[in-house]
């Protein structure tokens, strides 16, 4: 049987080949294989039944309201039944499968529509419950919604519960004229949302809770500290309670940010950066406004700001600065450090005392930044130095002595102190690099400006001391122009002598200022001899500058063209 079977297979293959050749010759195409019929796509039906159940839920809520209004059900019992009824609908929303999102949203909204109108009428119309009780119920409802949505990570349920708690609390805060209970409710909801964010849940709801908490604390602060006091219709707001709300606002977001960025390792978000700054501004500003009636608050706020600034610096440079590229968290904490230090020093001190503290901070930051190679610390030192100089008024006084007509020196000791701080900071900045070079240029410019102003003060004072107070001021103008021109020569010599390009780059600004004085002031003096002296000094400086800059040790970046 085996040979016959093989022969049969051979004949079948031969017949298939002949049929194929005949199809090619006659042009008859083989019929295509039958394709399976396309199955029409059926759209998922709308959750009509879910809509119906939601309508029945609202009907039950209206039935509870009717029973409560008629007196058949006591008010407190009706409110308790309404809360339990709303919780049941929230549980139904949490137990709905994740794929049925519309049904989840409907049940969540039904729960909100059951509870919130009931609380509104029970608080404002029937006065069956106090504002504190209403706030407690809203807080429980919101936290229960967040907890019920936690296991399946149901964002719709968490969002609806949070919006209901925030919106109803804000509405009752305005309508009841009782700010304090609902301010604490909004703060508690914000704390619950931040606790969820620390566990990486419900990050999108953070800004809603933060805005509500910020605005409620701001409103309470404004009502208490306004010029005419709290309006008569509002419930009393004790200062201790308001202070507690201010501190709680800052504590919530500081703790949340510290946990997320330091303990959990998440990077700073724009929300956290902005909200921490806003919360700090609200807390510090509110405490300072309250300090008008309680002077003890200002030192406490200033001390707290300085303590937080020290903590931010320690976190930035002891933990986050690991020698690699600085992270976003490093810049955020270091920036908060300098802002808090400035705020704390300004609250605790004023005038000369603040300038002295900022100058000391400038030297500390410049020295530590140079020793450890931390450019951020050096930048902070430059900012502290700038604020110290501006607070002392030394740069403005130097400007009046160099470019104006002032003859009486004021607060010379602050100018001398500024010169010393600038010189010490310039010595501390020894690293190479374009960033440090820019900082050295700023320090050298401040040093030369203050020194020139002090020299002009001393020379004009000596001139009037020798020739009398009634002596002509024409030669004072010559002295000021000469100080600028000689200052340019000294800057050129210092740049070549100490290999410091920062001084060499100051030559041209000094000579331009001297030229301005020469044209605007010196050439218009009645004493022509004073004008001649000014021209001689300026011309001599122009002749001497190229010789000073062509020395063998001159900086290549500051060598002028001949």
Image (cartoon, grey):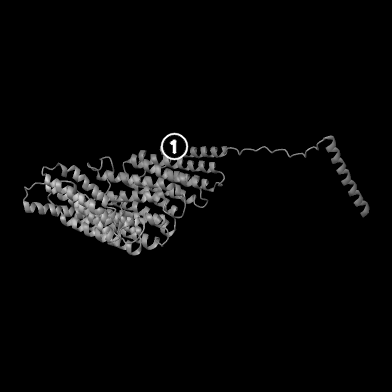
Question: In the figure, is residue 467 to the left or right of 157?
Answer: left
Query: Is residue 25 at all visible to an observer of this figure?
Result: yes
Q: Nearer the viewer, residue 261 or 24?
A: 24
* Residue 103 place in picture, x, y as percent: 54, 42
Mark 1 — residue?
A: 66
Identify the residue at the far bottom of this view: 371
Side of 361 relative to 272 (left or right): left
Residue 390: percent from left, percent from top: 23, 51
Disc 1 crowd, CA 10 A, few/some/many (<14, 14-19, 20+): some
The quadrant in which the N terminus is found is bottom right
Indicate the quadrant where residue 26 lies: top right
> Could you say which is closer to the camera, residue 295 or residue 108?
295
In this image, 458 relative to 552: left or right?
Answer: left
152 or 410, nearer to the observer: 410
Where does the image place residue 175, in percent across and percent down from the top left?
34, 39
Write the residue at 7% across / 54% down.
466
Q: Residue at x 17, y 49 (%)?
A: 536
Label 1: which secondary element: helix
256 relative to 18 in the view: left or right: left
Instruction: State which quadrant residue 120 falls in.
Output: top left
Location of residue 2 with respect to 114 vertically, above or below: below
């Amino acid at each position: 049987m085996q040979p016959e079977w093989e022969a049969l297979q051979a004949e079948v293959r031969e017949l298939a080949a002949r049929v194929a050749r005949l199809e090619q010759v006659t042009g008859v195409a083989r019929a295509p294989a039958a394709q399976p019929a396309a199955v029409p796509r059926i759209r998922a039906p709308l959750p009509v039944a879910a809509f119906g159940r939601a309508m029945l839920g609202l009907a039950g809520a209206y039935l509870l309201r009717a029973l409560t209004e008629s007196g058949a059900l006591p008010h407190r019992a009706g409110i308790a039944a309404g809360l339990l009824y709303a919780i049941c609908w929230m549980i139904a929303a949490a137990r709905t499968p994740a794929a049925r999102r519309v049904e989840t949203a409907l049940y969540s909204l039904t729960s909100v529509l059951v509870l919130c109108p009931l609380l509104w009428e029970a608080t404002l119309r029937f006065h069956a419950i106090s504002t504190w009780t209403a706030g407690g119920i809203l807080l429980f409802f919101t936290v229960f919604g967040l907890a019920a949505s936690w296991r399946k990570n149901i964002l719709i349920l968490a969002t609806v519960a949070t919006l209901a708690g925030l919106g109803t609390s804000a509405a009752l805060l305005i309508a009841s004229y009782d700010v304090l209970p609902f301010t604490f409710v909004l703060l508690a909801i914000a704390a619950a949302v931040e606790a969820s964010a620390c566990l990486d849940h419900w990050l999108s709801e953070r800004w809603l809770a933060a805005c509500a908490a910020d605005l409620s604390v701001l409103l309470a602060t404004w009502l208490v500290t306004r010029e005419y006091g709290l309006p008569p219709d509002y419930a009393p707001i004790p200062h201790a309670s308001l202070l507690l709300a201010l501190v709680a606002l800052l504590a919530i977001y500081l703790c949340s940010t510290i946990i997320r960025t330091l303990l959990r390792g998440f990077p700073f978000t724009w929300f956290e950066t902005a909200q921490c700054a806003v919360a700090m501004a609200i807390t510090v500003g509110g405490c300072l406004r309250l300090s008008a009636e309680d002077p003890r608050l200002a030192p406490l706020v200033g001390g707290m700001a300085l303590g937080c600034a020290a903590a931010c610096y320690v976190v930035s440079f002891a933990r986050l600065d690991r020698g690699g590229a600085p992270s976003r968290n490093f810049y955020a904490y270091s920036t908060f450090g300098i802002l808090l230090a400035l705020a704390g020093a300004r609250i605790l001190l004023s005038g000369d005392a603040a300038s002295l503290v900022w100058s000391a901070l400038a030297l500390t930051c410049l020295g530590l930044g140079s020793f450890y190679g931390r450019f951020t610390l050096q930048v902070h030192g430059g900012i502290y130095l700038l604020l110290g100089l501006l607070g002392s008024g030394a740069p403005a006084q130097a400007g009046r002595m160099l470019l104006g007509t002032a003859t009486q020196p004021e607060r010379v000791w602050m100018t001398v102190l500024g010169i010393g701080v600038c010189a010490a900071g310039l010595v501390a900045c020894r690293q190479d690099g374009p960033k440090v070079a820019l900082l050295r240029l700023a320090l050298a410019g401040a040093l030369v400006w203050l020194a020139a102003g002090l020299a002009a003060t001393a020379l004009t004072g000596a001139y009037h001391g020798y020739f009398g107070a009634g002596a002509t001021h024409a030669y004072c103008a010559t002295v000021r122009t000469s100080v600028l021109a000689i200052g340019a020569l000294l800057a050129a010599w210092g740049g070549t002598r100490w290999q410091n390009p920062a001084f060499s780059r100051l030559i041209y600004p000094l000579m331009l200022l001297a030229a301005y004085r020469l044209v605007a002031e010196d050439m218009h003096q009645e004493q022509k001899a004073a004008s001649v002296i000014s021209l001689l000094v300026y011309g001599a400086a122009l002749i001497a500058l190229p010789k000073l800059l062509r020395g063998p040790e001159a900086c290549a970046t500051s060598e002028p063209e001949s």
